[in-house]
Amino acid sequence: MHSQATGRFCTRCGAILDIQTAVRIQNEIESLDRKFSTLLQDEDVQKLLMKKMIEHGIK
Ligand SMILES: [Zn+2]
């Protein structure tokens, strides 16, 4: 059971209780996803990411 004290998020688990907020955040994530997909097709970005992954030990 969610608990909504004042805001749009559940005070207990952080779930979004307002459908408009949920839709807006979903749209923002999708938009960001498209931007990243475009960036990741760039060879320079791929090289930089590869370099950074090695630097941070990410495999
Ligand atoms: Zn909850």
Image (tube, helix red, strand yellow):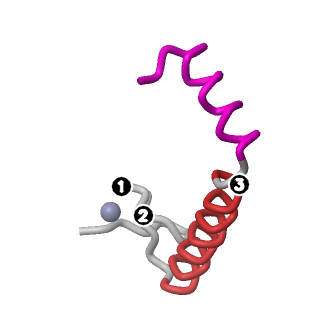
Disc 3 residue lies near ligand 1 with CB under 8 A: no
Q: Find disc 3 in the rendering and name its residue.
A: 39
Identify which residue, 7 or 59, lies in the foreground.
59
Q: Is residue 49 above or below residue 43?
A: above
Q: Quadrant of residue 12?
A: bottom left
User: What residue is rendered at 50% in x and 80% in y?
Assistant: 18
Residue furthest front in the image? 43
Of the four image quadrants, the one with ligand 1 is: bottom left
- SS under mark 1: loop
User: Could you tell me which quadrant the C terminus lies in?
Assistant: top left
User: Residue 1 in the image: x percent, y percent?
Assistant: 23, 68
Q: Find disc 1 in the rendering and name its residue.
A: 13
**Contact check, label 2 and label 1, Cβ < 8 Å:** yes
Q: Find disc 2 in the rendering and name its residue.
A: 10
Q: Earlier in the sequence, mark 3 or mark 1?
A: 1
Q: Which residues are magenta?
A: 43-59
